[in-house]
Image (cartoon, rainbow, N blue to C red):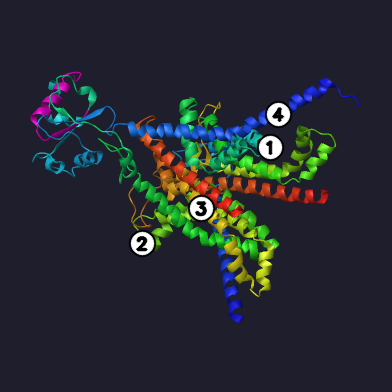
Amino acid sequence: MKKKQVTQNIAFWIFRIFSFTVVGILFWILGFIISKGIQVINWDFLTQPPTDGMTGGGIFPAIMGTLYLTIGSIIVAFPIGVLSGIYINEYAANNWFVKLIRIMTTNLSSVPSIVFGLFGMALFVNTLGFGDSIIAGSLTLGLLTLPVVIRVTEEALHAIDDSFRTASYALGATKLQTIRKVILPMALPNIMTGLILSIGRVSGETAPILFTAVAYFLPKLPSSIFDQVMALPYHLYVISTSGTDLAASRPIAYGTALVLIVIILIINIIATLLRNYFGKKVKTNF
Amino acid sequence: MYINPMKNGLKKFTEAITEKILLFSSGITTLTVILIVIFLFKEGMGLFSSPDIEEGYVLAVNQENPINQLTPEESMEVFDSKITSWKELGGKEEDILVFRLSDVTNYADETSLGDEFQFLPHVLDSIITVNPGIIAFIPQQYIDSTFTGKILNNGHITAESFFDGKYWYPTASPSPLFGLLPLISGTLWISLFAILIALPFGLAVAIYMAELANQRTRKIIKPIIELLAGIPSVVYGFFGLVVLVPLVQKVFNLPVGESGLVGSIILAIMALPTIITVAEDAIRTTPRSMREASLALGANHWQTIYKVVLPYSMSGITAAAVLGIGRAIGETMAVLMVSGNAAIIPSSLLEPMRTIPATIAAELGEAPVGGIHYKALFLLGCILFILTLIISISVELINTRKKA
């Protein structure tokens, strides 16, 4: 009897220690980058272009580039993804076509990001002739995010009880009216949370834009969607792996990493707050 | 009640149109997958019909030389001076004289080449005729109709030389070598070891979250795991580069810290959120009645977890591990930054290694579009696509078996 208890205690303590190790690793990474990066970040760092061969100045063009690419991919992925999610959950019968779509969506979500990069290069950059540009990068990133957006929408819609649908039909509403006036407003908080998290994912992606959008250094901001851009993740990759003057470029790398982390932190906090806020609201309403 | 027929018709029309738009949107993922397959394989398969010598060049030997053909490996060893006699290649007892176009000034002065190198073909021809042991790597355009030497037949890059090739020298001249083995072994070593590290941790956290933690702790840990999943891979790579690489170098006393081990550790951290989420979901699906039955029989909580919950959720945990491997195999930037990128078949985890995604990311920028190197990198993309497809299908199979 006692031995049993001892084994349990040991096992449970191992689980606790492992869990806190994982939490510790996250805080180690965050703490390290925040403590090193905070010394670099100031107003000039955020608003000036790089100078002296990437060893001085700021990262403004990279911040803007990431912003453009993220917005571009949102424009590509969100409408298509949300509409697909609605179709799959609300309209689709359980036939072979829907099964095919489901399988393809799962497969697409498992395709590595570098393969998206290859694909984007072959299709958008070379075949369609966009060249390395915001539009090629946005389309590539958008397709990469599409499965996530579809899944988020589908899950949010799936969580809504069928009684709301039948109640709406009983009042004489059509399918489209039901979706627009009843289902979507209810699912919106969950969809929004998922979409916001996917924005975080997109803004940190490097491999897909490596050959479709980014440039090592551009003194000016892009003037059209067919221009190349700098991007934060690529900037971090380049200045931390190449360059001869590591002592001078390291601080900039720390600063860039911190900016990336802060973007992700803000996005995650917004998502969590949104979920908690609407989670409570939904509970009190129904 | 009066229903305006016009309005009703419009309504029906809108409904129908909307459904068509939605249907079209949901077809886009399928279309994308098809396009990915088409573009990847179209470019990648082009490798196998490419000549195995640099485009626009030929290998020429003396007329008397009995050798008709060299494999890419052989020509690489010849030009690296690892093979120095024709005898080793099955020819005559004769020393090999390696000749590249830039060597021409050792044999002829500028006047004999002509002002615009118009006599170059003639000069090359005479050099090859005079030296019986010569092997010349020269552009095809300088071979004219009066050429008296022998041009070696070049072969094509074969599937065998790709899948069974031990060397990845994409820019070697005269014959670039595209061997998959070093890259696939690097990929598998790093990914499998990453899962070996990540699985115990992931499983422990999943059990802790599903079985032990109270509501409040869970509410703290859940966003932390989400955050861990949200951190961009370049940031992980950067962290690995500045923290783990020096650490591993010091602990194991290595000449360079960039190694498969650091890659595995970083990948393990990156695969954790996937493993934790999937495994936790699996553990939670264990029916309450099964737990209660176990507890009622006098088993304590740990025995119930160990003997009832874990066996019940084993397929879900397997799915978690397989998904984690999938993540690890496809991960690019972090691995590229920390694992050293040496394209050799590794013999220990402490050596620098190179994975398939890292190779694509590192080399595609320098490969001329449409060239042989470009095609080889697309073929690597195909391999990667197939690997992850297999993984995605196995997860699907594991999940359906669970339901049945």
Residue designated by label 1: A86
- Quadrant location, the N terminus of chain A: bottom right
Q: Chain of mark 1?
A: A
Q: Chain of mark 2?
A: B
Mark 2 vs mark 3, foreground winner is 3
Mark 2 vs mark 1, foreground winner is 1
Task: Specify whether residue B193 is painted magenta.
Answer: no
Residue designated by label 2: B253
Q: Chain of mark 3?
A: B
Instruction: Identify whether B272 is placed above or below B181.
Output: below
Amino acid of disc 3: Val
Residue B18 circle label: 4
Magenta-drawn segment: B113-138
Q: Earlier in the sequence, mark 4 or mark 3?
A: 4
Mark 4 vs mark 2, foreground winner is 4
Q: Are marks 2 and 3 on the same chain?
A: yes
**Picture quadrant of residue A3:** bottom right
**Secondary element type, mark 3:** helix
Pick the front one: B244 or A117:
A117
